[in-house]
Every structure is written in C-alpha cells, then in structure tokens.
C-alpha cells in the first residue's frame, strides 16, 4: 500500500510508471544512497575496434546500391521516425522546443517533417510514419503548433503521438516537493523511457503491424539527423539491431 497521496499515485500510474518504482527511488534518496557511485560502470571499458565502426562507402556504385535498398525499405513502409519531443518546456525562453522558430518561419518540428516529405518524394514512397514522444507539458502546445501550420503538409494520419512517463519531485527528506502554487511538482523523467513508452502505448505494435521494422531516433532539435536512405540501406544489410551515426 503506497503512502503517497492517491492523487499523486493516479497521476504517476496513468502516465506509465509503477508507483513502487518511484517510491523505491525516494527511499534510496532518504537513506542517503550515493547515486553517483551506483551509476558507475563496473564492467570493462574499451574504445571501439575497427570492426565496430562501419564507414559510409565512397564509391558511387556502392552508394547507389545502399540508397536503393533504403528507398525500397521506405516504399515498403519499413522505416519511420521516432522524435523525442518531451521534457518540461522550460528551455528556449519557456517555449516548447519543437515549436521554436529556427529560420524563415520554420520550427524544429517543421524542419523534421519537411525533410521526411523530401526524402519520401525522392524515393517515390508514402511519407514515413512519424512517432512523436511528447510529455504532459509539450503535448498540447505541440498539437496546437501542428494544427496552426497545417501539419507542414504532412499527412495527419501518419503522425502518431504518445507521452513520456510523468513523476513527482521529492525533497531530500522524502516529502513531496511543492511548486509555487502549493501543488505537487511533477516532471518528465528524461527520454530514457522511450522504449518502455513505445511499447506501452501500443504504437510499436501498430507500427510493426503495418510493416515497420526500423525507426530513426533523434531529438526534435537535431534537424541534421535526416532520414538518409544510404544509412537506412546500410542498416538493412546489417545484423546489428542498432546503428548509431557519429561524426569525427
């Protein structure tokens, strides 16, 4: 039986977190557990070997083959975008990050959607499914931003939304932290819950039922994380479940 107020338990559980997990973290805080020490890696660290790194080929023939493989995956509906758009909307002057103008009246989210439309047009494929992970703080403003901009020309039925988990803040003594309004202070506990939320929302199952097999994961403000058919084609030919794009 939880000793948190019922209202708080309802908010936490309705947004994807077991209350027992939150209470366990609170108890560890109260007893003074060294969280920094608990997060230290106990295994062996090593730098990547040459076999761990796959480089984009330079010869045009190979590039063309990979691009065709990626575009075939797009035409088959096998690839989509997973965009992290959660958080507390406290940065960028207190605005929802995805709705902030970057250039020429275009927002971060607008750039992401327009890029996906561009790639789909070149591949002669339907626009890929876009899954937005919002939070309670960003969900409403994000929907309003999309509606005000006619979804930047993107098919509305191909933009799916889910919310990240929602938890409550504690004071060092384990009591619930209150905001200036005297109400419990809630927050989104980071984007590390994306896989859990994707499964719990049912959107992963829905995506896979429609033929989806690969998702490009990026933050909403990373507009250079483009849906590149070459990289998609590379991933289609690999045994690894995850491909991470890095630069020198």
Image (spheres, rainbow, N blue to C red):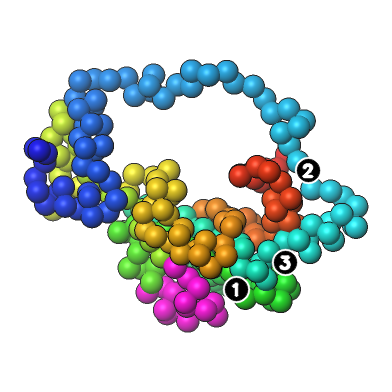
Rendered residue at 34%/44% (across/down): 189
Q: Secondary structure at mark 2?
A: loop
* On-image quarter of the N terminus: top left
The residue at which mark 3 appears reads as 72
Q: Horizontal placement of 172 versus 194: left or right? A: left
* On-image quarter of the C terminus: top right
Query: From mark 3 to mark 1, how far is it between C-alphas?
Result: 13 Å
Residue 147: image tag = none
In front of the other: 66 or 151: 66
Decide whether the magenta segment is chiefly helix, strand or loop: helix
Crowding around mark 2 (Cα neighbors within 10 Å: few <14, some 14 to 19, many 20+) is few
In front of the other: 70 or 4: 70
Q: Which residues are magenta?
A: 144-160
Rendered residue at 20%/27% (across/down): 27
Which mark's residue is nearer the viewer, 3 or 1? 3
Residue 202 visible in this rendered orientation of the protein:
yes
Q: Secondary structure at mark 1?
A: loop
Above or below, 49 relative to 62: above
Q: Is residue 122 part of the magenta span, yes or no?
A: no
Rendered residue at 59%/56% (across/down): 214
Residue 127: image tag = 1
Task: Tell me which label, 3 or 1, sits earlier in the chain.
Answer: 3
Counting every numbered tag in the picture gives 3
Above or below, 30 relative to 104: above
Query: From mark 2 to mark 1, how far is it between C-alphas?
Result: 27 Å
Q: Is residue 150 part of the magenta span, yes or no?
A: yes
The image shows residue 20 at horizontal and vertical percentages of 21, 37
Q: Secondary structure at mark 3?
A: helix
The image shows residue 4 at horizontal and vertical percentages of 11, 41
The residue at which mark 2 appears reads as 55
């Amino acid at each position: 039986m939880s000793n948190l107020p019922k209202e708080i338990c309802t908010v936490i559980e309705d947004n994807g977190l077991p209350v027992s997990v939150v209470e366990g973290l609170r108890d560890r805080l109260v007893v003074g557990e060294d969280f920094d020490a608990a997060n230290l890696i106990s295994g062996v660290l090593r730098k990547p070997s040459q076999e761990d790194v796959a480089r984009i080929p330079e010869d045009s023939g190979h590039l063309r083959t990979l691009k065709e493989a990626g575009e075939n995956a797009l035409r088959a509906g096998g690839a989509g975008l997973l965009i992290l758009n959660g958080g507390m909307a406290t940065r960028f002057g207190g605005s929802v990050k995805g709705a902030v103008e970057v250039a020429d009246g275009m927002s971060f989210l607008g750039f992401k959607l327009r890029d996906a439309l561009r790639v789909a047009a070149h591949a002669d494929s339907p626009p890929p499914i876009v899954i937005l992970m919002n939070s309670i703080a960003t969900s409403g403003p994000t929907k309003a931003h999309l509606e005000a901009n006619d979804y930047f020309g993107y098919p509305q039925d191909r933009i799916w939304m889910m919310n990240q988990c929602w938890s409550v803040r504690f004071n060092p003594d384990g009591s619930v932290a209150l905001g200036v309004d005297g109400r419990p202070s809630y927050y989104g506990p980071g984007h590390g819950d994306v896989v859990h939320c994707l499964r719990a929302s049912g959107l992963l199952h829905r995506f896979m039922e429609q033929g989806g097999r690969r998702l490009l994961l990026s933050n909403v403000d990373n507009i250079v994380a483009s849906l590149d058919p070459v990289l998609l084609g590379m991933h289609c030919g690999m045994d690894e479940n995850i491909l991470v794009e890095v630069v020198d």
